[in-house]
Amino acid sequence: MGFHPFLASLPKRTLGIAGASLASLALFSGTASELHAATPTWEKQAAQAAPPAEVLTPEATAKPATEGTAPASTEAVRFISYNVENWLTMDRFVDGKSLKGAPKPDPEKQAVTEILARQKPDILGLCEIGLASDLADVQQRLKAAGLDLPNSYYTGGSDPVRHLGILSRFPITSTSNSAILEYQLAGKTFQINRGILDATIEAHGKPYHFIGLHLKSKRDSEQGDQETIRLNEARLVRNHIENLLKANPNERIIVYGDCNDTRGTPAIKLLVGKYSSPNYLTAIPMKDSRQMAWTHYWAAQDIYSRIDFIMVSQKMKMDVDFPASRIIDDTEWNKASDHRPILAIFK
């Protein structure tokens, strides 16, 4: 994407992921007709042991929101999707030193906490969480900062390090692990790296069916071509959405997360579906206060891009406050993560 003068003045993070190789789709196990059916344009609509596949905390049963804080039924629901960049234990390079088995540094955790406390989401979808205890750490820090999100759900895929989590001040009424997570690539069976988070939350008498994802990064992989892997993962998510809408065409679905790809790419086209289909997902268009649309800074390539999305099914679309939904351009963003959080408001 082109650079704006403002971008040149932004602070650069010292850590970046490895450069991405040019991808080939020759090994993609889906058919050409799947891609042909995808939406042609977007202009039509502005090293730890792996935990169990899913962990539902006791608080995530049908527990009411914190007493005395539940808003009137006419109040909007604020949802934030945020890749918090390695809120986990790993080998790191911090302040000029190599550290083995180190947690996310406290200044970075504090920056994430302060950004979220200022934005006051009712529901928070997170990428790059380590253990369930790391999700609890986020939850406790937010509560200490005045943002109480007592209900939580945590899950993952084949990646033993990075997982998905969701926090909510409203009750999590159900979760599911029914999604098919395996695919074939070059004659071998693989599982989606970060899994598919499936949780329904009841807010103001309405169900919100959240599907969280974190597709394959642009890093090279021993499994095969990174773009091909991402395309297969997107197909698994799309198949899960199709099954949900087949069972209930009125399902109020919100698909969110770090897609590691930009609009118009095969993986994103496959994920949103065919524009003319009733099962098409609308990606909520968002910009920050400067009318810029990037959500991620890739330090290794010095690239700003939009790879984080919140998408909604057609029955959910009518509740989206499009003008109020936005990319959060907090001045502390680069101290917290290499991603900026994105906010959707549901009326």
Image (cartoon, rainbow, N blue to C red):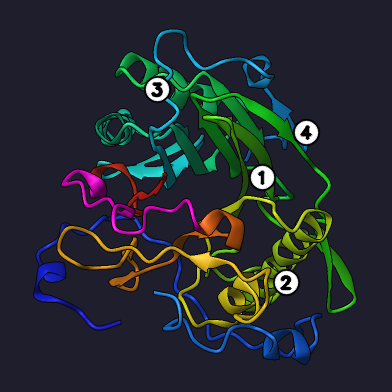
* Image mark count: 4
Answer above or below: position of 142 versus 248.
above
Categorize mark 3 by other alpha carbons within 10 Å: few (<14), some (14-19), many (20+).
few
Place of residue 61 in the rendered image (x, y in percent of width and height, measured from the top left): 69, 19
Quadrant of res 171: top right
Q: Which of the two discs, 2 and 3, labels the residue nearer the N terminus?
A: 3
Q: Quadrant of the C terminus?
A: top left
Circle 3 SS class: loop
- C-alpha gap between disc 1 and disc 2: 17 Å
Magenta-highlighted residues: 318-334
Residue bearing mark 2: 232
- Whether 319 is among the magenta residues is yes
Residue drawn 72% across and 48% down? 157
- C-alpha gap between disc 1 and disc 4: 13 Å
Residue bearing mark 1: 197
Name the kind of residue labelled 2 in the image.
Answer: Asn
Place of residue 81 in the rendered image (x, y in percent of width and height, measured from the top left): 45, 47
Residue bearing mark 3: 71
Place of residue 237 in the rendered image (x, y in percent of width and height, measured from the top left): 70, 61
Q: Which of the two discs, 1 and 2, labels the residue nearer the N terminus?
A: 1
Q: Which of the two discs, 1 and 4, labels the residue nearer the N terminus?
A: 4
Q: Quadrant of the N terminus?
A: bottom left
Horizontal side, residue 73 vs residue 184: left or right = left
Residue drawn 32% across and 31% down? 120
* Labels 1 & 4 near each other (Cβ < 8 A): no
Answer above or below: position of 317 versus 187.
above
Mark yes or no: residue 215 visible. Answer: no
Dominant secondary structure (helix, strand or loop) of the stretch shown in magenta: loop
- C-alpha gap between disc 2 and disc 4: 23 Å
